[in-house]
Image (cartoon, rainbow, N blue to C red):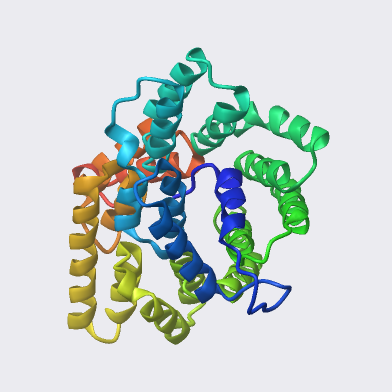
Amino acid sequence: MKPALPLTLLLMFSLAGAAHARGPGTTSGTLALANLDHLIAQRGDDPAADELWLTRARFLSDDEALARGTVAADAAAPDAPALLRRAHARAALHRFHQALADLAAARTAGAADCDWLPLHDSIRIAQGAALEVLPRAQAAAAATPGFASQAALATAYAGAGRFADADRAFAAARAALDTTSPLPYAWLDFARGTMWAEQAGDARRGARFLRRALAYLPGFVAANLHLAEIEAARGETAAAEQRLASVAASRDAEVLALLGSLHAATDPARGAREIAAAGARFEELLAARPLAYADHAAAFYLGAGANPERARRLAAANLAERNTPRARALAERAARFEGGVTPEAR
């Protein structure tokens, strides 16, 4: 999940601990996560806990935390604060059109620009409209240089395909950080690494930043997954398997699927069981929060999950919410399976 990156990271400042410093003055990842859980327990049912639950979901691939952080997604919203809360929940679930409608209603109800515009722009980037947002992000970074504006600018540049500019903005955002929490550092390095590896096609550079993210937070599930994908592509199968095994307890469906694909070569029965478990997990997640998982589930069903019709429906639903290069490529790839014809045969 990647909603409202700058907002997410700013809220992480409150998770810092004062002692047990490591590296460049940050606490250990274990302590930071313990602090996060403590804050969640303190907040209880307070709406202010929503973003804390979502932070847990992002780092630990915790679907229960995602559910707790998005309870407002289908709640009544009679005023601007409720509309903003619902918009954040819907954005986290990739229900982008609904979230934008809530933001428009919140604006009409009197919400200040600073309350609705950052999420609006984050959603538009996620929908493939980074060029629409970029001039505003550039102006904000020039007017109020700092962590939040540079992080927002980095995501806009990345969405626009201006990777060198994005990298400089990521570096500027990182330099502006002033916290003992490792979580913002880990997330920035993860975003920077996935940009290089997945959008820019530079796996070597991407792996460097993913490793740095994991130095801050070894249990960061998505960072382990993406680095394992790079290792597997390089033929470093043992390293990839070990990395995935370290986070398999999260029950992340993609982790299970990649483990199964790697094991299929040496232990077909084990690989088949793991791929089946991944499919069952995807179906469990899709039943509860379909758009949140449509993208990655479609990729699974085009590959190890071997259900092209299911993939086609999921890819179409994903594309309807966000017209990004990845979403278009996924939908086109799924369409090439129509009639049982594989992409290779075409």
Can residue 200 be seen in the rendering of this structure?
yes
**Foreground residue among 242 and 271:** 242
Q: Residue at x 73, y 73 (%)?
A: 24
Left or right for 286, reference 243: left
157 up-or-down from 206: above or below: above
Can residue 335 be seen in the rendering of this structure?
no
**Foreground residue among 93 and 31:** 31
30 up-or-down from 58: above or below: below
Left or right for 212, reference 63: right
102 up-or-down from 266: above or below: above
Determine the residue located farthest toward the front in the rendered image: 42
Q: Quadrant of residue 213?
A: bottom right
Q: Residue at x 58, y 63 (%)?
A: 183
Q: How many dots with numbers?
A: 0
Q: Position of residue 208 (x, y in %)?
A: 65, 71
332 up-or-down from 198: above or below: above
Q: Residue at x 77, y 30 (%)?
A: 139
Q: Position of residue 199 (x, y in %)?
A: 57, 51
Q: Quadrant of residue 318?
A: top left
Q: Residue at x 47, y 70 (%)?
A: 34
Determine the residue located farthest toward the top in the rendered image: 108
**Foreground residue among 266 and 148:** 148
**Foreground residue among 11 and 285:** 11
Left or right for 312, reference 119: left
Q: Position of residue 128 (x, y in %)?
A: 53, 34
Left or right for 155, reference 344: right
